[in-house]
Each structure stands twice: as C-alpha cells, then as structure tokens.
Amino acid sequence: MTHECVFPGRSLVLGRLVLAAAAITVSSASTAWGWGAGHRFVTEGAMAALPQWQKDLLGKELALLGSQHCFIPDLVYAKKEVRKYAMMDSKPDKFYLVELHLPPAPTESYEILRYFMAKAVEQFKAARVDEGARYLGTLSHALEDWGAPAHSVPGDNMFTLMKQFVPPTDEYRYLPMHSPMEGGTFTVDLGDYKPRLLGGTVEEAAFNLLHRVQQSTIHARAQVIPIMRALYAKDDAASNAAQQKAGHVDAEVVADAVYTVLCLGQSRFEPPAIEPLTRVDLSQRITLETPTLAWPQSAFFSKPYWGHPTRGVSMRGGKQAVAIRVKAADDALGDKPIEDAVAVGTKTTLTYLVPPGVYDRLEVWAALHAELGAGGNVIFEIKGADGKTLAKVQVQGDQPAQRMTAPLAGQSTVQLITTTGSADSTHNYAVWARPQLVKAEK
Ligand SMILES: [Zn+2]
C-alpha cells in the first residue's frame, strides 16, 4: 500500500523501496513508513483468526507472512529473488504489476485472485509450505491494497482531485496525500471471527473472494473523507481509527482467503461450510456495468423513470423506494417483500461474471412489480458470453412472475436484459427476483 506502488518516477520508486526494504528488515511493527506497517497490522490480525491446524501447518511462515511475505509486491525492485511470487504467466515481462496495488476492473481482479490462489494451492498440495506462503503474501497484499482507503478512489491515487472536493489546509496544499492517508498506526483484532470457506475449487473461491474484496473497497471509500479531515485537523487518533476500520474489514477478507487456500491445499473441509455454497445470490453481486463499483450514468435506464438498478426496492417515479413484491402462481415466492431481487427498467443490461465450470445454471424469476408494474410489458432475456440467448420470456399486465432457467455450461458471463414489449413503457417496473447461480446436484 505504499504510494511508490503506483508512482511512475522510477528512481524515486527505487529509492523509496530500498528504504522501505531496509525499514522492514530493521523495524518493528511500530515503525510507520507509509502503509507498509499497515500491511503488517492487517496480515497479523488475519493470521491470528486462522484455526490452529492452519497455524500449525504454516509453522514459521505464519509470522513471516505478517513480517515479510505480505510486502512482496512492494519489494520487487529491491529484492530480485521475490519477483517470481508477484508475477503472472500472462505478463511474463512485467515484475511490477500495478494491479496488485490498485483494484482493476472486476474481470481482471477475478483473474488475479484466481491466479495467485491457484499458485498458492499448488504449492501447499506439494507440501512446499514456504513457497505457498510467499504466494499467499502476494495475494494478501493485493487484497489489503484493494481494501485500503488510500487506494480506493479510482484514478486519483494521490488525491489531487479529492483535494478539490475537500480543500486542504496549507500543510497539504502541495503534498500528495496518498502516503499520509495510509500512514497510521493501528492494530487489528478480529476477536472470535471465524474465517469463511469461499469455495470448493480455486475458481469458485476466487469468484466469492472477488465479492468480498469489492465490498471491502466500497467500505474503504467511506473512510476516505474522515481520514482527510482528520489529517487536516492533525487528529491522529481519528485518522488511525478510520484506517483501522478499513484494516479490520481488510483482515477479515485476508483471513477468508488464506483459510480457503489452506483448506484447498490440504483438501480439508469442514462439512457445514461447503453446504451454503451450492447457491449464490446473484442480486448481491456487482455487475460488469460498474467497473468502478458505482453506476455510471451511461448505464442508467430511461423507462419508467431515469435511474439505475436497485437491489431490494423499486423506485416509484424514480423518487420513492418501495419494497419489492411480485405476483407468483402458487405463492412460489411467498407474500413477503423480496430483498434478493434487482429492480430495473427498460432497457437495462446486467452483466455478471460467472466462474467457468463452477455453476450448472442460473435460476431467476422474471416479474413486474405487483403494484407499480401492473400494466407493464417487458421482455426478459438471459444471454451468455457468446451472445446466445439462454432463456427468454415476456411478462405483461398483471401476469404472474415466470421462472427462468439458463444453462451456464461454457459461459464466463451471463447477461440479464430487459426490453420493453410495447410502445408504452411507463409501467415497466421490472424485477429480476431471486437470481441464483446453482451448482449441479450431486
Ligand atoms: Zn501495494
């Protein structure tokens, strides 16, 4: 999480990284140089939450993960021997990957998580614990950086734009703010947090980890302005507290990732953990229409109002949130408001990543909002990455919701598309209710 990560002045980078490397060698956790210490606080918090069998398995690497391995992507200039743990086969000429520090768009983020999880699992399977731990260090670093407030504003890593929104004091007028933003001192104590199993395969785990870390990025963004204000006010306690908040969520994500890699590497799964993974609630997942995790205006729909997709509520006239209720034959959806649903208008495209080979099908109910959508007319279509229509229905007037099932074999994305079925689209309060990725029954 150092600002050197993404600052292109090579000689400055090198100088600072050498300094940073020296600091790691000689320092204790109390030495604060940029966010380097932050990596240690977060990783150590995460490691403490692992079950005893995993701590035993890691042995001496457990402590090294916090004191050394989690810094690997920052050390690739200074320490040639660690480069291979932070490189990707797809980019054989690059040993400094900026994506390991700044969250790239979701598809690339997924590939990075999948790649380094696979590398680590492969090493643990071969009982090369020291090698596996180094790949885990790179994975942890990326997760920590992606969930760091200082890395969370797209395209504004030095906060020159944010300073226009939150005007600085004289002290910060000319100073790039990345380093102060992540330069706090804090500890992370996850208490009795139990790391979660994210998947039974690397692909599934990376897919669920992507969701976890995206939530962490969003959470970190809420700390940006509090940290800026605290720095301006020279309120170290407030700045540290806000950084700690982000660090806490970061550590939970790292704990989940490391826990899962070690379960996969040992093929050791606690049976109840695998059970809830057979279905994924797609309504919670972030679509590829939001590469920065926020809706761009270009993805808004125009009918029945001008707005963006919303989870758990429809927007009456675009202004008032109304719980989602839909008509369904045989009470198949119950009579309670449906939270795991996405309300959209026409035309809307929702594109979701699906990890290849993990899920058998997408199940979803296509519906009009029971109250607002009576009189609507909407065509619901599900398409695969290859553009092929996997399922299509039309719902109009006061017709009940229709069940849709789309086979996912061979697909890497799936699109949920709504278009109007008539010239009058003023009642097209459309709903994708209970969208779920479902594994094949065994
Ligand atoms: Zn970094």
Image: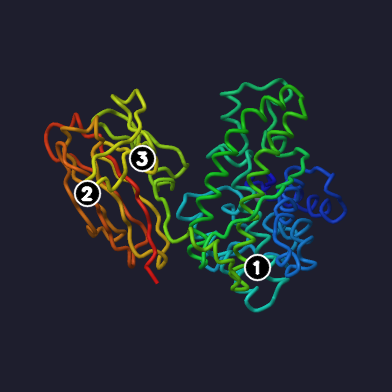
Count residues near mark 1 (Cα–Cα under 10 Å), then give few for <14, some for 14-19, many for 20+: some
Please give the residue where the numbered disc 2 appears in the rendered image: 402
Mark 3–mark 2 distance (CA, rounded to whole Å): 15 Å
For marks 3 and 1, the one nearer the N-term is 1
User: Element under label 2?
Assistant: strand
Q: Nearer the viewer, mark 3 or mark 1?
A: 3
Q: Residues within 10 Å of mark 2 (few under 14, many from 20)?
A: some
Amino acid type at image mark 3: Ile
Task: Identify the residue at horizontal 66%, vertical 22% (top origin).
Answer: 168
Q: Please tell me which residue lies in front, 199 or 175.
A: 199
- Whole-angstrom CA distance, mark 2 to mark 1, is 51 Å
Query: Relative to 14, does residue 431 appear above or below in the rendering?
Result: above
**Mark 3 sits on what residue?**
338
- Taking the image as shown, residue 38 lies to the left or right of residue 290, namely right
Q: How many marks?
A: 3
What residue type is disc 1 on? Lys
Q: Give the class, few, some or many, for how many residues have Cα within 10 Å of label 3's Cα (few <14, many ≥20).
A: some
Q: Type of residue at label 2?
A: Gln
Q: Residue at x 77, y 40 (%)?
A: 186
Where is residue 386? Give x, y as percent.
28, 61
Establish if 353 lies above or below 1: below
Tell me the element at label 1: helix
